[in-house]
């Protein structure tokens, strides 16, 4: 794995100011049943880092004390963490909106046959990666047989009411380009996905989010190896749209890693760029009980152009 951070600093990316925390994005571990080429987390079945019960309980205390409206649970495949269901149940008991970043194939893993029903019973919103509506492109990016398994997972979710008109259960899909390109227009691609998945597989969903690939971790390393890193950065920088600065997710989100350490976003977490308050890095989720980060600066670097290029990218899709 080639390091990308030395290529991302220094940077002239504009300073961004923090707003009130609306979302706690909690990465409960890097273990995943897949090992996709574009993964910015380097997740795989071989990763063993997971959030333990003590940190999960700290997260729940913060949700309750700070009245954070949304918990966004990510990984890896977050559902593989044995504490996942406890976290979801207790957050929902607090009235928190819970989002599960689901890779779909985990719904078909042995021992997880009841996972889709659990998510539906807890009214968890699902954001699921599906980088194309064709088998060829999905398997190329995510591995052999991933498309078939993803369709099976989507059918299970649809059967429970996810994504179905009139249902309260929300199912959003995520698209990211196969290579070092910007995503196409989100609304046009959403219409294409709805037509193709509906016609060929009878699948329905609510919205499609288009995200740019970040020049970090596995994707960034591949670009370096292929000699395409500098060209991709030029593309992101040349497509920078200042209007997107208002909506970048770090303004209203705090990212927590499996040890409870805080970051400005999941990408900074993966790069090891900690959230710094009053000169002290590696603040812990328990520090949020005292509201200690409200005036903390956001640590920006060159990868931030991945959030503002073109129509922009955030944890809920395009910004423009
Ligand atoms: S499914 Fe998601 S977390 Fe797992 S390897 Fe693929 S991109 Fe990474
Ligand atoms: S990469 Fe993170 S810190 Fe940079 S703009 Fe995007 S969300 Fe904010």
Image (tube, rainbow, N blue to C red):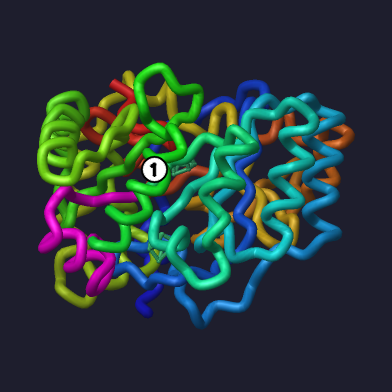
**In-image side of 238 versus 288 (left or right):** left
Quarter of the image with the C terminus is: top left
**Residue 229 falls inside the magenta stretch:** no
Q: How many marks?
A: 1
The boundaries of the magenta stretch are 129-147
Q: Nearer the viewer, residue 234 or 36?
A: 36
Q: Is residue 297 visible?
A: no
Question: Is label 1 within 8 A of ligand 2 (CB to nearest ligand atom)?
Answer: yes
**In x, y percent, where is residue 207?**
32, 29
Residue 192 versus residue 153: which sits nearer the camera? Answer: 153
Residue displayed at 26% across by 26% down: 241
| Quadrant of the image containing the N terminus | bottom left
Residue 183: % across, % down: 18, 40
Q: Nearer the viewer, residue 157 or 179?
A: 157
Q: Which residue is mark 1?
A: 304
Instruction: Tell me if residue 83 can be seen.
Output: yes
The quadrant in which residue 174 appears is top left
Q: Dot 1: what SS?
A: helix
Where does residue 56 sit, x and y in percent of width and height?
A: 78, 53
Magenta stretch holds residue 132:
yes
**From the viewer's perspective, is 189 left or right of 88?**
left
Label 1 CA crowd tier, 10 Å (few <14, some 14–19, many 20+): many
Q: Quadrant of residue 230?
A: bottom left
Q: Nearer the viewer, residue 227 or 98?
A: 98
Quadrant housing residue 290: top right
Residue at (51% x, 72% y) in the render: 110
Image point (82%, 37%), residue name: 62
Q: Residue at x 33, y 52 (%)?
A: 214
Residue 182 image offset from top left, x and y in percent: 17, 43
- For this view, does 107 lie left or right of residue 35? right
């Amino acid at each position: 794995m080639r390091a990308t951070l030395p290529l991302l600093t220094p940077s002239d990316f504009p300073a961004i100011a923090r707003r009130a925390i609306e979302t706690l994005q909690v990465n409960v571990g890097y273990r995943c049943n897949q090992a996709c080429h574009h993964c910015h987390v380097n997740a795989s079945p071989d990763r063993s880092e997971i959030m333990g019960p003590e940190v999960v309980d700290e997260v729940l205390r913060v949700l309750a004390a700070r009245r954070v409206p949304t918990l966004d649970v990510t990984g890896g495949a977050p559902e593989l963490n044995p504490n996942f269901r406890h976290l979801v149940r207790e957050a929902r008991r607090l009235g928190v909106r819970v989002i599960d970043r689901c890779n779909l194939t985990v719904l078909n893993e042995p021992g997880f046959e009841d996972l889709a029903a659990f998510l539906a019973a807890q009214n968890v919103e699902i954001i699921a990666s599906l980088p194309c509506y064709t088998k060829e492109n999905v398997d190329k990016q995510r591995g052999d047989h991933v498309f078939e398994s993803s369709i099976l997972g989507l059918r299970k979710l649809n059967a429970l009411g996810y994504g179905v008109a009139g249902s309260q259960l929300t199912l959003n899909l995520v698209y990211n380009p196969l290579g070092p390109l910007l995503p196409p227009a989100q609304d046009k691609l959403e219409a294409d996905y709805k037509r193709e998945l509906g016609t060929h597989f009878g699948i329905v969903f609510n919205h499609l989010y288009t995200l740019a690939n970040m020049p970090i971790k596995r994707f960034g390393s591949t670009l370096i190896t292929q000699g395409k890193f500098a060209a991709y950065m030029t593309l992101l920088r040349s497509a920078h749209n200042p209007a997107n600065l208002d909506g970048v997710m770090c303004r209203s989100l705090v990212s927590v890693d499996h040890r409870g350490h805080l970051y400005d976003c999941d990408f900074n977490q993966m790069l090891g760029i900690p959230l710094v308050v009053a000169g002290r890095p590696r603040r812990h989720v328990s520090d949020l009980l005292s509201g200690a980060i409200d005036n903390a600066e956001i640590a920006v670097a060159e990868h931030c152009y991945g959030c503002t290029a073109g129509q922009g990218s955030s944890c809920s899709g395009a910004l423009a």
